[in-house]
Amino acid sequence: MASGCRVGPSILNSDLAALGAECCRLLDCGADYLHLDTLRPEHHLRPPRRGEPAQAARPGALLRLGAANGSAVIYLPVLSALFCWRTRPSKDMHMMVARPEQWVKPMAVAGANQYTFHLEATDNPGALIKDIRENGMKVGLAIKPATTVEQLAPWANQIDMALVMTVEPGFGGQKFMEDMMPKVQWLRTQFPSLDIEVDGGVGPDTIHKCAEAGANMIVSGSAIMKSADPRSVINLLRNVCSEAAQKRCLDR
């Protein structure tokens, strides 16, 4: 069974100078988990040049805590302190790094609950999945817009969650890609018990498309963080997903 409908605010959009207070506020507003985008700048995929399709991230657009160079090693103590606080809320680490293998143990030690890596970033997903589990974390597997869902399919029965990116990963202000919804729908049909997360441009205006396609884990950044009433936005996103899931059950 998929684990129910859950909403995870992206803390990338929070006030990073008051990160603990921001996370506390989000959880008090009903967030089910926290979504943390992580990238080492030397491994980032550059923003698109004019006339090119978008690729990935500017380092300055991502979570870079504790050091001017954004090194994951340096900011791990910050993450560890954050993770040990407030009854250890569920944390989904979205690892937009070139060598995800090298950060599994450090993130586990820091206290991450789920390690989500990109299929495009590794030559051996099976070994990485095994390593993540052996380090006590759930496994998330993400695909960028240009990656077909069929490339993820061989691993779907070995992971806890599939992340379908609905923008190019890593930088804000992008429009929600509705043409990613057939990927979500295909995954829900083929793997009905799989948790399916969507990330990028998701908010009150686009949640119905995500929910109807079959997403049950919703990452939302600016739609929550910029709202005067984040609790209402979180409740709306969750309720729309729950209603769509109930309808799917009745239609079977």
Image: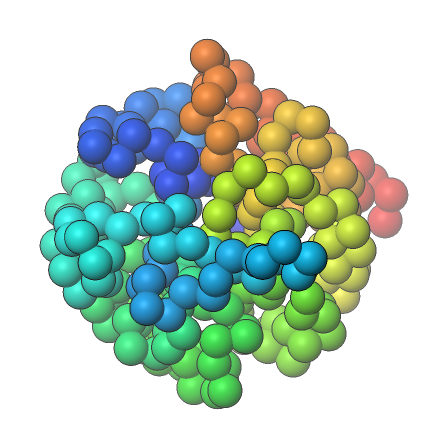
Residue 107 falls left or right of residue 235: left
Residue 163 falls left or right of residue 184: left
Q: Quadrant of the N terminus?
A: bottom right
Q: Residue furthest front?
A: 50
Q: In the picture shown, does residue 73 fall above or below 25?
A: below
Image quarter of residue 75? bottom left
Residue 51 x, y percent position in the rendering: 69, 57
Residue 99 x, y percent position in the rendering: 37, 77
Q: Residue at x 41, y 80 (%)?
A: 128
Q: Residue at x 85, y 49 (%)?
A: 252
Work out whether residue 134 or residue 175 is closer to the camera in this orientation and state it. 175
Image quarter of residue 73? bottom left
Q: In the picture shown, does residue 241 fall above or below 102?
A: above
Residue 129 x, y percent position in the rendering: 44, 77
Q: Residue at x 48, y 62 (%)?
A: 46
Residue 9 x, y percent position in the rendering: 44, 36
Q: In the picture shown, does residue 228 fall above or below 174?
A: above
Q: Residue at x 52, y 17 (%)?
A: 232
